[in-house]
Image (cartoon, helix red, strand yellow):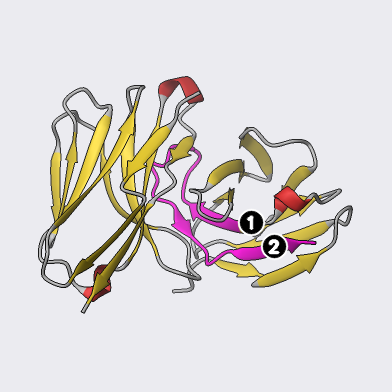
Amino acid sequence: TQLLEQSPQFLSIQEGENLTVYCNSSSVFSSLQWYRQEPGEGPVLLVTVVTGGEVKKLKRLTFQFGDARKDSSLHITAAQPGDTGLYLCAGEFEDSNYQLIWGAGTKLIIKP
Amino acid sequence: DAGVTQSPTHLIKTRGQQVTLRCSPKSGHDTVSWYQQALGQGPQFIFQYYEEEERQRGNFPDRFSGHQFPNYSSELNVNALLLGDSALYLCASSLGPSGRASYNEQFFGPGTRLTVL
């Protein structure tokens, strides 16, 4: 059974600071996605990474996929209060018939 | 362009009862997936419907069943409710039969919050 571990579980920082959150698995991902979920809403897709070593940027957000495709990170530069939310990673694994397996998320609060 | 809509928003049931949740996909989408998100956890895949058939199923008991209608809308039914069924139930729609989120982006609705007492 594939498990995704996200860390930290909770992060509260001041506006303007930088932060990194992580997503790890003991198995190799076929692909990995990052979502952001706000209270009362469903997750919204931020990015999909497929190739080991891949780096994608979305404004102040930088996503990295590990070379071995077992881990990923999300780095936010100069965090803003609008970045507040639950950040979820979700992976596809060949062994699980490509059904999305989700981490428990990192709850991020950016204080003004 | 209407996004994914779900009804009801909130629901309170007692143990042993049955519940039906409804989902209308994003305009133009033909595939609907259902997820259960317990408090403090990530979503867990329940099943996916395409062409009115269940195409994939996660590790959920038969008490969880579904249906897709010709207009692509979908229902999730849960029988013999347990306290542990309390969760946010999310519906996601996508276009195409691939079934792989990396191929076809999923758009999520706001969810139905089910509380079982």
Q: In which quadrant of the rendered view does residue A51 lie?
A: top left
Q: Which residues are magenta?
A: B89-117
Q: Position of residue B6 (x, y in %)?
A: 61, 67
Q: Position of residue A97 (x, y in %)?
A: 50, 25
Chain under disc 2: B
Taking the image as drawn, is residue A49 in sight?
Answer: yes
What element does badge 1 sit on?
strand
Looking at the rendered structure, the kind of residue marked 2 is Leu
Q: Is residue B28 above or below residue B99?
A: below
Residue B114 image label? 2
* Mark 2, other Cα within 10 Å: few <14 / some 14–19 / many ≥20: many
Q: In which quadrant of the rendered view does residue A52 lie?
A: top left
In magenta stretch: residue B103: yes
Direction from residue B69 to residue B93 in the image, left or right: left
Q: Which residue is mark 1?
A: B87
Chain under disc 1: B
Q: Are marks 1 and 2 in contact (CB under 8 Å)?
A: yes
Direction from residue A15 to residue B58 in the image, left or right: right
Looking at the rendered structure, the kind of residue marked 1 is Ala
The Cα atoms of the two marked residues, 1 and 2, are separated by 5 Å
